[in-house]
Amino acid sequence: MTGEQVFEETIAKDQRVEPRDWMPDGYRKTMIRQIAQHAHSEIIGMQPEGAWITRAPTLRRKAILLAKVQDEAGHGLYLYSAAETLGADRGDLTRRLIDGRQKYSSIFNYPTLTFADVGVIGWLVDGAAICNQVPLCRSSYGPYARAMIRICKEESFHQRQGYELLMTMMRGTAAQREMVQDATDRWWWPSLMMFGPPDDESPNSAQSMAWKIKRHSNDDLRQRFVDMSVPQAEALGVTLPDPALRWNADREHYDFGEIDWVEFKRVISGGGPMNAERIAHRRRADEDGAWVREAAAAHAAKRAKVGAA
Amino acid sequence: MSDEIRHEWPLFEVFVRAKRGLNHVHVGSLRAADHPMALHHARDLYTRRNEGVSIWVVRSDDVVSSGPDDKDAFFAPSGDKAYRHPTYYSIPDSVPHI
Ligand SMILES: [Fe+2]
Ligand SMILES: [Fe+2]
């Protein structure tokens, strides 16, 4: 059998493609792009919440937030590791991110204005990420699927800590309840945009589905997320900012309003409130850390020489 | 100088023993300047929740592996040796413990 036949059969049988297998160039490119974008999202995703670590209201919340943000760093690294199995280079991917040649999730281009944002990010943003990521645990590329399994195991903590934080605030003062509602109002629509453009405007989706890189369409996953979130919002006592949101007994799903795709396109292509700052921060971290990486490499080289002598 | 070394730490493969009595299992890779740093990074990256009691790190370029093309040469010969399996031998049900 040729490599191509093995590949087709692997996909047809729902088995995993592994790094050294033959794969179409398009598959490799799509996989690298998707994994890199995902990795960048985890890394950039540390910033909105990371901004609150020093201002967390209690030691308990600080420890939780620190652990959560550390997890996101870990998720980024699992994913860069998976991308490297395809021949991508981690340093090169970072440079592509910093130069604006590769994208990350539009959600992280919004500011975190109050501590309630930390809770709402855990609840809605990590919640949407879970919806997206659970099916990816069965993605056809083995290293990506395995990284996703590890990530999904950790995401549940992220969502639950956020929701618990919000429940605590809802039991607090009227001002705290208002903060939760305000944060919900600001994050709801951007969370829905996390699932990507609508199916009829998602050009690469069909091929990704055929290759079993993707398992569900953007709109299906978005609907699933809406259906999950409505009862959670009710239990919390907040209103989701969408007057069109109502149960549709025929479809057995919630109907919801029109998403502002103009805003989505603006934010994804650099025009969001925080795009410039997120990239500037990442660039600074990269540049400020350069001397440490160089010193460690020089130290390792010197020790290797001494050992060999 | 800075452009040459930037990011160019070697790649290490990481293996974690989940608990005593189990094998080390491959969990992923990471970049580090040397072996001690690779171990520390592996601890931070792959064992944040008691996932392991022991870690191995191996330079990725030290790993030698069979390729997908070797599959037949390596593994096909064992396919026709059914007599290596216990089910190849029929023993009456009346014989106990065998
Ligand atoms: Fe994550
Ligand atoms: Fe998360």
Image: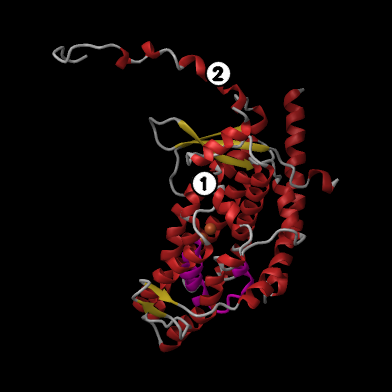
At horizontal 72% and vertical 26% (from top left) the residue drawn is A307
Q: Nearer the viewer, residue A128 or A17?
A: A17
Report if residue A252 lies within the magenta region. Answer: no
The three-letter amino acid code for the residue at tag 2 is Phe
Q: Classify residue B22 by image quadrant.
A: top left
For the image, the number of numbered tags is: 2
Residue A42 drawn at (x, y percent): 59, 58
The answer to whether marks 1 and 2 sit on the same chain is no
The kind of secondary structure element at disc 2 is helix
Q: Quadrant of the C terminus of chain A?
A: top right
Please tell me how crowded label 1 is: few (under 14), some (14-19), or many (20+) other residues with Cα within 10 Å: many
Percent position (x, y) of residue B47? 49, 45
A181 to A143, vertically: above or below: below
Chain part drawn in magenta? A106-129
Q: Which numbered dot is residue B74?
A: 2
Question: Residue A119: within the magenta?
Answer: yes
- Magenta segment main secondary structure: helix
Q: Position of residue A213 (x, y in %)?
A: 55, 50
Residue at mark 1: C-beta within 8 A of ligand 1: no
In the rendered view, does A33 fall on the left or right side of A209? right
Q: Which residue is the extreme one toward the bottom?
A: A174
Badge 2 crowding class, 10 Å Cα cut-off, few under 14, some 14 to 19, many 20 or more, is few
The answer for how far apart the CA atoms under marks 1 and 2 are is 27 Å
Nearer-the-camera pick, A272 or B68: B68
Tell me the quarter of the picture where residue A268 sits. bottom right
Q: Chain of mark 1?
A: A
The numbered mark at residue A145 is 1
Q: In the image, what residue occupies the spot 16% across and 12% down?
A: B95
Q: Is residue A232 above or below residue A131?
A: below
Q: The residue under label 1 is which amino acid type?
A: Ala
Residue nearest the viewer, comparing B35 with A163:
A163
